[in-house]
Image (cartoon, rainbow, N blue to C red):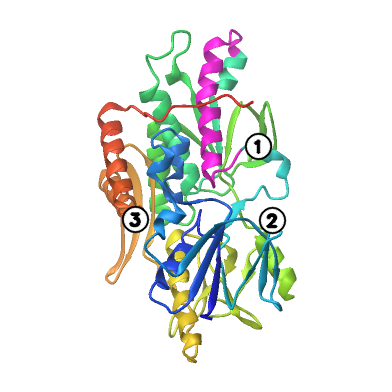
Amino acid sequence: MRPQVLIIGCGCGFGGLEAARALRAADVDITVVDKTNHHLFQPLLYQVATAGLSAPSIAAPIRHLFRHQRNVTTLLGEVVALDPRGKTATLKDGAQLRWDHLIVAAGATHSYFGRDEWAAFAPGLKTLDDAFEIRRRVLLAFEAAEREDDPARRAALLRFVVVGGGPTGVELAGTFAEIARHTLPGEFRRIDPRQAQVLLVEGSPRVLAAMPERLSERAREQLTALGVQVEVGARVTSIDDEGLDITTTAGQERLASRCIVWAAGVAASPLGRTLADATGGSVDRAGRVPVEADLSLPGHPDIQVIGDLAAAMSHAPGQPPKAVPGVSPGAKQMGRHAAANLMRRLRGQATLPFRYRDYGNLATIGRNSAVVDLGTPAGPLRFSGYPAWLFWLFAHVYFLIGYRNRFVVLLDWAWAYWTYDRGARVVTQKR
């Protein structure tokens, strides 16, 4: 039999997908197992949550992606247990999968910093289900405000709070403001959507803290110009179905809101703890699994962990190791590196340490507004505003999976740009 490669996680992340693709010419049999049937382009997930794009524009069936790769078998299932000694993975339905080489790319989920009860009141954004729920809450808040006679309750319905000033939070807040000020006016008779208040709450001193301070400040200015109220240095202390409490330098403040979105914390998939327990290892505070320089587990060279699940270090020649950021380029590079090291082991060669190549960061704030921080051989290239927005647009379209998706997204964005219309505003009531 040919070597059996098991890849866990290929749907909502990039690492597993890249690893499987990099092994397309390998003399191995690959089984890809994921609890969703689709690969998701997460950088544009906020566009689904804000009715700018429909789900098929940023998602593709995993089976379709691998239809021409004959050494891949795709399975829909959730791994709940791992046996490194017997080299088997157990699915939720009791089925078992065997491996000779295992690549774990289960990704990440939301972190509420020990306050998981907040999830019911402030959904995060990691999956299509999350996006549909956020879109439903936002649009139904306007509908409820149209029927509300009490001014205080109407104001709470029209106050949208995004917790977390990273790229996702910035993108959501900016788009919420655009919806209120450009998309919905004229469609209601009893309310003026332009009176909606959008707040971005960030615990650190500035938004987009991973970017240079100048770009961070530029992002804050662009958010303010869109009508977003930015609260930095604000720590959330409680969230309920009526609003949230925050603590700032000015003291405690209560914000009445019926629509709160969580974009403040990320934690590794619970499968990381399962893997650590099975191998006698550990996880860090974010639930990530520490790995060796070649991305394998200590004492288990047949198991590699990649993407958001791995507490990985970049080992550039002549430089001290640096932590690999939890971004999609890092997951893609780890996926390709894991596949290359797997092939080296099959050939009896020594594996190579992982080196992360940082190509920079970018985030969009809204229409014609973005910030870009690129690493180039000549030094950092940093710019903002309309040129950055164009760069962001074409970069994301380029990396979309499938040519049909690129074409559809370009058409949708062109229409939205000229008309301010967001055509994916279909929601259903929960049963």
Give the labeled residue for mark 3: 399
Secondary structure of the residue carrying numbered label 2? loop
Image coordinates of residue 197 in percent, x first then y, are 50, 25
- Disc 3 is placed on an element classified as helix
- Marked residue nearer the N-terminal end (3 or 1): 1
Query: Against 165, is 335 above or below?
Result: below
Q: Nearer the viewer, residue 40 or 230?
A: 40
Which one is closest to the eye, mark 3 or mark 1?
3
**Mark 1: secondary structure:** strand
- Residue at the image position 35 percent from the left and 49 percent from the top: 371
Residues drawn in magenta? 123-151
In the rendered view of the protein, which quadrant contains the C terminus?
Answer: top right
Label 1: how many Cα within 10 Å (few below 14, some 14–19, many 20+):
some
Q: Is residue 154 left or right of residue 244?
A: left
Q: CA distance from mark 3 to mark 1?
A: 38 Å
Would you name the residue on which mark 2 appears? Answer: 92
Which residue, given by chain and number where applicable, does mark 1 sit on? 246
